[in-house]
Amino acid sequence: MTNRSLDKKERILEAATRTFAEKGFFNAKISEIARQAEVADGTIYLYFKNKDDILIQIFEYMVERHLENIRQAVAKGGSPEEKIRMFVRHHFSTVEKFPKLVEVITIELRQSSKFMKEYVPKKFFNYLGIVSDLIIEGQASGVFREDADPEITKQALWGSLSEVTVLWLKTRKKRFDLQTCGEQIAELYIRGLRA
Amino acid sequence: MTNRSLDKKERILEAATRTFAEKGFFNAKISEIARQAEVADGTIYLYFKNKDDILIQIFEYMVERHLENIRQAVAKGGSPEEKIRMFVRHHFSTVEKFPKLVEVITIELRQSSKFMKEYVPKKFFNYLGIVSDLIIEGQASGVFREDADPEITKQALWGSLSEVTVLWLKTRKKRFDLQTCGEQIAELYIRGLRA
Amino acid sequence: MTNRSLDKKERILEAATRTFAEKGFFNAKISEIARQAEVADGTIYLYFKNKDDILIQIFEYMVERHLENIRQAVAKGGSPEEKIRMFVRHHFSTVEKFPKLVEVITIELRQSSKFMKEYVPKKFFNYLGIVSDLIIEGQASGVFREDADPEITKQALWGSLSEVTVLWLKTRKKRFDLQTCGEQIAELYIRGLRA
Amino acid sequence: MTNRSLDKKERILEAATRTFAEKGFFNAKISEIARQAEVADGTIYLYFKNKDDILIQIFEYMVERHLENIRQAVAKGGSPEEKIRMFVRHHFSTVEKFPKLVEVITIELRQSSKFMKEYVPKKFFNYLGIVSDLIIEGQASGVFREDADPEITKQALWGSLSEVTVLWLKTRKKRFDLQTCGEQIAELYIRGLRA
DNA sequence: TATGAATGAGTGTTCATTCAT
DNA sequence: AATGAATGAACACTCATTCAT
């Protein structure tokens, strides 16, 4: 029962992720998602308020998964510098593991007006907050410049990660693989922040 | 004649920019743009292939304007480091001068599937190419690390600029003004690249 | 068992009457009726064929109740004239006693296409037949005009009663109370029929 | 131009009247109306706000036509009694001339929730007002009873007319023709009102 | 009897685009 | 070049009804 329900919801989330990644948010039809999830159109509305809500739940599901691991991953790095490296590595290994999911989050999410205008991604703020915390920690321990603004830097790093991710997802011409991407960006920010 | 035509096309571009920025790409109606430009609905199709094309032409118009100045602006900086600073400053001063325009380019453009999937922004590549050229120049003159990949770094910088821009456009709570943003990001990348 | 069943059916009829009167036939949801009757959605279909059938059964239930009393009530009037007065009075006192029920019968019933097109309200014909019988009786005893058509008059009276009822239900601005309505209409028809 | 537009709007009104009468308001599809009017679906929305609006405009169109003539028709009757006769006759001759139109007005109109709940049929009130004016006139000249309430009587008469009309429209078993109906009802009310 | 999760048919309305003038 | 009336494809969502339990 609960089992079947969870099954169904997950099947819909999966089907939606695939469909959104392939067709884009707007061109993805509810009936196509239903078909792929092997449920009736109406069933989708037992688990989701509307089309935008599917996207938002994909996002939340993703952030939750990601968040579970990221703190542990970051903790493994001893110094703040190493922690930043871990954060970046973790991002790209997630991209590598769930490219479709990341594609939807990074590209299609912006097409949902509900998401862009009404939804406040609280958990995502927590996630990004890890970065500014790292910077503050590094500044406290003297390894990072005092004059670097943690908020701006956090945002800048996130921009770098997602832009490079989009490029990689779009081209798939891995002249540079994701490992390289990660090391390059981590190095850039670590040196950029060093006191 | 040509005069009136140019007039009309520009009026449409302006009206579209305003409307896209205010309502978003999808909620902006062609008839609303026509009304604001004081032309008939059909007239728009004498100058633009379709709704997406308006967006693309706004983008090209923007890049052209931006490109005209950017090379001169960058040239003013003597060293590669200073040139990067000029590039970033130029970006944010443009954001400051044409916020509506930048908002459309940075946010609404991603809503057009034509743009995201079919259009190859050649001129924009030229524009971004300035950055990788700068890095290569800096590496040649020994001020930048040889192991920094110019392509990845270029993309990372662009990601930082646009992400911070989006944040600034959305919040308008200038806890940090754009000047500060620019200096922060420039410093980050210059130090990050330094040999 | 039978006890509980009757209970349940009656609870559904009551809940439906309330819901139909409040929301109208089309805006009343089966699930809302089920919620109010404290049964499961599916249970309703053990007692009723479909949504229209609920309405029809409300109607029949009403007519049965009404019919039980009306003959006695009419019988109390000695002369045909007085009997018409009793009929009209009885109608309005029912409106007064069960306004919700009457509202559903008089207004919402017309929204059901099943009712309007397929259902033949046999019992209701019996009910209205009382009027034409009265008229014939009056004609036989010489108090009513021979040239009044009992069928047309019956229909006309019914139209008057329901139209005035609708007005009263809609406005509730009792500039005239129901008593007055009844006396006015009875007087009109008695004089109109008098030989 | 204006010519074509009027044409088109009238064609839609006609097609809608026919379709509503045949299928009922709810079962009438916009696309079916468009097909019958030989216009595109979207064209309907250039002339009408929505489906309910079509019905409302049919109603207004009808009342306007009816109102134009009714005052003249009533004026022809010399005495108040004769005027009531004219009013009733006029009603049934309209039913005879435009049965489809009357069917929509009398039966289908009640299915539109917009009409029943939001629209206030001002012109229709004027139309019915003719009746209460007649009664008051008759009371002033002493031919009608002083104790007959003009408002209730007006409403009662309207109920009689529409109920008998519905019966006639539904059965078409003209055991009594409309002429007879008119004379019967007129006689009933004239006698019923007589001082 | 009773449940309630699942179904899936069904449609009014919008709006980018066209084309006769 | 300019118009703007006309087009018609396209689709998320609801809710009465069913049926496995």
Image (cartoon, coloured by chain):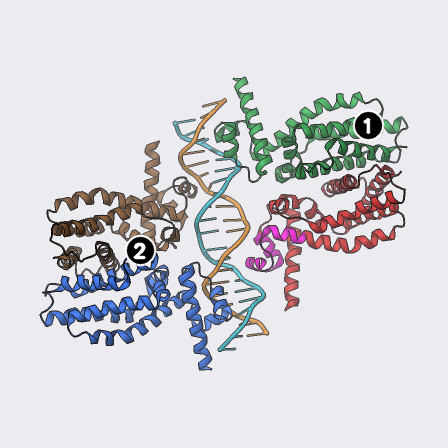
Chain colours: A red, B green, C blue, D brown, E cyan, F orange
- Residue at image mark 1: B134
Considering only vertical position in the picture, is C125 above or below B14?
Answer: below
In this view, the residue in front, B121 or B30, is B30
In percent of width and height, residue E18 lies at: 48, 34
CB of mark 1 within 8 Å of CB of mark 2? no
Considering only vertical position in the picture, is D109 above or below B108?
Answer: below
- Residue sitting at x 59%, y 51%: A51
Residue type for callout 1? Leu
- Residue sitting at x 80%, y 32%: B186
Q: Is residue A39 magenta?
A: yes
Nearest to viewer (mark 1 / mark 2): 2
Chain under callout 2: D
- Residue at image mark 2: D107
Q: Is residue A57 left or right of residue D97?
A: right
Question: Exactly how many numbered labels are in the figure?
Answer: 2
The magenta span reads: A30-58
